[in-house]
Image (spheres, rainbow, N blue to C red):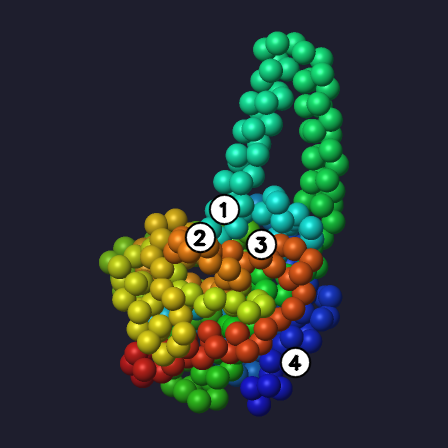
Amino acid sequence: MKEELLKRLEKDLCFDEKFRVRRKPAVKREFFAYADEFFAARGYGKGRADGDFDDKKDQVNLIFGDENTADVILTAHYDTPKNNAGLKPFMFLFNKAGFFAQGFSMLFVLAAVVIPAVLLGINVHFGLSVLWVALMSAWVFPNYFIFDNKFNFNDNMSGCIALFYIADKVARERPELKNKLCFVFTDKEEAGVKGAKKLKKRLLETLGSEKLAEKINLNFDCVGGRDPLNFLVTNTDGGLEIANKIAESGDFKVYKWGIVNMDTHAFKEMRSVSFCAASKRYGVSSLLESKDIHTNRDNFLNTKQIVKHSDAAYDFLKNNIAE
């Protein structure tokens, strides 16, 4: 049953190109219809799209369950990155290492080329700066704004499949928990966790800060890569307590970071924990890298890893959420 479900999800959501680029309204609608049918077949009722697909400025979260009454909100972002394969030097990594490397290179060019060209008026410097800008523009612009990135098996179809997998397992083994859970596919995580912020804002307006603080968020981001290091990340004491409980059941490292470039950053008012995986650790807890994401190597789905993370979340729900 488990293997059959995972093969079907992998085929439908990764190998079939229909859903691989989830940025345009038509594709988002189709993905929502697919998810709606999946959840309805397992007794979760009809889902809803929290926004207008045709409004480019809107963030359309896909919600299955009642986020206001649920004890636990499970999330994964369903949007895909803009930049195409091969732009790893321009990728903002989890650990911000890519951000700082890119920033320092830009400062170097600014200090060594652009500023001297402006202040000294040296033609060679000016010429080099124009050449550099032209080359970078020719490389970045078409990849970032024109071509679609179809390589996103890990980031973040793996997180979406984790939600489908958990929803199916709960429906089959612990259906009494369904009303305690809400599954949300968040939008525009890649553009500044905007969907998660929108969801949090509405919850604050509806429930207030005290009730929101009682809720648990389990977020899944990049849990299906090659030979990863498994970790749980949070930015609150309440989230740290939950992460430590989950880590007891599996081989997970737990990190508490003040700033996290994922939906957990938006959910700091809740007891929020993100399930993640990295390909490499640099010896410092805050420096983790997932080297495949946002590149053409993100074309492999490690279903064993998805199951590992999903089962750990399911065990936590089974053992800690009152029926």
Task: For marks 2 and 3, give the one nearer the viewer.
Answer: 2
Number of the label disc, if any, that sits on residue 66:
none
Task: For marks 3 and 1, give the one nearer the viewer.
Answer: 1
Q: Nearer the viewer, residue 285 or 6?
A: 285
Residue at label 3?
52
The residue carrying pointer 3 sits among few (fewer than 14), some (14 to 19) or many (20 or more) residues within 10 Å by Cα, namely few
Direction from residue 50 to residue 211 in the image, left or right? left
Q: Earlier in the sequence, mark 4 or mark 1?
A: 4
Q: In terms of secondary structure, where does tag 3 sit? A: loop
Direction from residue 299 to residue 52 in the image, left or right? left
Task: For marks 4 and 2, give the one nearer the viewer.
Answer: 2
Number of the label disc, if any, that sits on residue 287:
2
Q: Earlier in the sequence, mark 3 or mark 1?
A: 3
Q: In terms of secondary structure, where does tag 2 sit? A: loop
Direction from residue 111 to residue 261 in the image, left or right? left
Q: CA distance from mark 2 to mark 3?
A: 37 Å
Residue at label 4?
8
State yes or no: discs 4 and 2 in contact (Cβ < 8 Å).
Answer: no
Residue at label 1?
97
- Residue 321: image location, x then y, percent: 31, 78
Q: What amino acid does circle 4 point to?
A: Arg
Q: In terms of secondary structure, where does tag 4 sit? A: helix
State yes or no: discs 3 and 1 in contact (Cβ < 8 Å).
Answer: no
Q: What amino acid does circle 2 point to?
A: Leu
Q: Earlier in the sequence, mark 4 or mark 2?
A: 4
